[in-house]
Image (cartoon, rainbow, N blue to C red):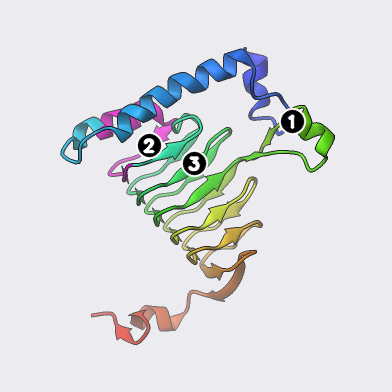
Amino acid sequence: MENRYGQMHSGELYYPMQEELVDLQARCLERLYDYNMTRPSEKEERKRLLQEMFAQIGEACYIEPPFHASFAGRHVYFGDHIYANFNLTLIDDTYIYVGDYTMFGPNVTVATAGHPILPALREKELQYNAPVRIGRNCWIGAGAVIVPGVTVGDDVVIGAGSIVTRDIPDRVVAVGNPCRVLREVNEHDERYYFKDRRIP
């Protein structure tokens, strides 16, 4: 089991439908089901479940149900003060790291699992995984998708609907499909919070 489980985190091709992995995932998804069935008033229960589900979850993190994750956060490391809106999907077949104060808009997907381009390998149901890293104080806009192996820097805004297929440097606004740097965070942003609306 340990060797097979280690393949998930090695970047190598492996067969994900091994009995041990399927059983592990099923146990994780039972806990995720419990989380998604909590009532809005059950804040302490949600907090307790997240602490059980995640590899690490910091202070004052909030994930709005429904939340979806391949392994219920087992391979996810969240810093402090992270907020996720409805329908965050984490394909956490290997590690996902998220820095403090990062926010996820609704319907964001962060994927670590990939499948080979070669059809013959896909017929064998093989998979590989690559970790994703998202920096501190990022805002990931609604409907964005971050694919395996990507690193997003600190203080980054990813525009709504963007498909992030390559690394994004610190302190930029990046948008599009594929996602590209639009501009740096600049002096205008220090004076205006939205279009021509001044920061009080």
Q: Where is residue 195 in the image (x, y as percent from the top left)?
A: 37, 83
Callout 2 amino acid:
Ile
Q: Which of 195 and 117 is in front in this view?
A: 117
Residue closest to the far bottom: 196
Identify the residue position indicated by label 2 in the image.
57
Please give the count of numbered marks on the rendered protein.
3
Q: In this view, does 121 lie to the left or right of 54?
A: right
Callout 1 amino acid:
Glu
Element at label 2: strand
- Of the two numbered discs 1 and 2 on the same chain, state the one appearing first in sequence: 1
Q: In this view, does 120 lie above or below 192?
A: above
Q: How far apart are the two marked residues, 1 and 2, measured between alpha carbons?
A: 27 Å
Identify the residue position indicated by label 1 in the image.
12
Identify the residue position indicated by label 3 in the image.
90
Q: What segment carries the magenta color?
A: 46-65
Judge depth for marks 1 and 2 and give the one in front: 1
Q: How far apart are the two marked residues, 1 and 3, measured between alpha carbons?
A: 20 Å
Q: How far apart are the two marked residues, 3 and 2, measured between alpha carbons?
A: 14 Å
- Of the two numbered discs 1 and 3 on the same chain, state the one appearing first in sequence: 1
Task: Tell me the crowding category of disc 2: few under 14, some 14 to 19, or many 20 or more residues within 10 angstroms, Cα based.
Answer: many
